Amino acid sequence: MSSATVRIWLWLVLSAVAFAQSFEVRPPSAKQGDLLQLTGPKSAVAASFLGRRVPLYPGITPAQTSGLMPVPVLTTPGTYRLRWLDAKGEAVEERNLQVTSAHFAVQNVVLSKSLTELRSTDDERTQVASFFKADSPERFWTLPIEPPLRSCLTSPFGVRRAHNGKLTGDFHGGLDQRGATGTPIHSVAAGKVTLTGEFALHGGTVGIDHGQGLKSMYLHMSKTAAKLGDTVAKGDVIGFVGSTGRSNGSHLHWALYAHGEPVNPLQWVSLQPCATAKPIKRNRTSPSR
């Protein structure tokens, strides 16, 4: 073996070792509502941030782990400590991560009195809570994800919602897309259907577990096509656009969640606002309940 070959071999070995031991967070800084993708060595089995601990799963190589960490919408802008943890819960790496304001706006929605007074039932709350409780350790999703409709955006993520001119104290936890009743709705990624129902508040609903903490939910359907326990591929039809539940017109509300926390899908998909979308009042304050 020549000396040049030995040097190349050593470089490859050292590079592989360094890669396996590397810690990475994408993006390196975040806005309120963002989703962080974490990578670490095999010794890192969990991560903690903003008081939340999430598991890390086998990564691209056997020597790596990876996982998802949500940045809640209501996080106060500032610098916070991100930690990778070993099996004993001790930090094997720590970094400061900056969270900046997303400058979420205020959007008013006109609703009838009956829709304003609509509330979720105990059964609905129980089923939705069960949907978020368990995460599949198997990863079904791959990037890029695809929007469920090829249509424009009527309401973005994170806007502070007002009903008939009065602030509700809530923020919009997903995206609203325009769609005619009966338009097919597609799964944004592969996964398993772990929630379906005709609910009072959400209307026709499908929830999909994409694995390793990532889930999606689709509301207000006129009809659901996916059944509980179904395995779906990215792009499969899971239901049809409608205006059921608390809805003032035919559209799709869909949301992404990381370990039960709503995160901004516009970090991963590109959608244009509808030309006739309801006016949004811009402000420079963070959302508050």
Image (cartoon, helix red, strand yellow):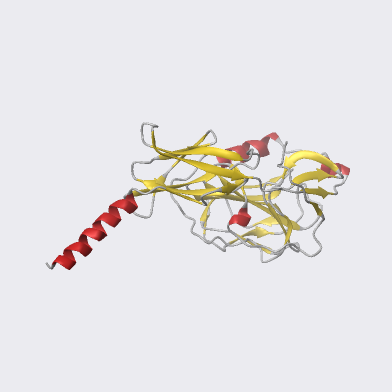
Quarter of the image holding residue 268? bottom right
Quarter of the image holding residue 166? top right
Q: How many marks?
A: 0
Question: In this orientation, does residue 61 appear?
Answer: yes
Say if 228 sits above or below 143 in the image. Answer: above
Say if 19 sits above or below 287 in the image. Answer: below
- Please give the name of the residue rendered at 53% of the width and 33% of the height, measured from the top-left corner: 51
- Please give the name of the residue rendered at 88% of the width and 42% of the height, measured from the top-left corner: 113
- The image shows residue 220 at horizontal and vertical percentages of 72, 52
Say if 51 sits above or below 65 in the image. Answer: above
- Please give the name of the residue rendered at 47% of the width and 45% of the height, measured from the top-left corner: 136
Looking at the picture, tell me which residue is in the foreground, 233 or 80: 80
User: In which quadrant of the rendered image does the N terminus lie?
Assistant: bottom left
User: In which quadrant of the rendered image does the C terminus lie?
Assistant: top right
Q: Is residue 29 left or right of residue 281?
A: left
- The image shows residue 9 at horizontal and vertical percentages of 21, 62
- The image shows residue 195 at horizontal and vertical percentages of 59, 46
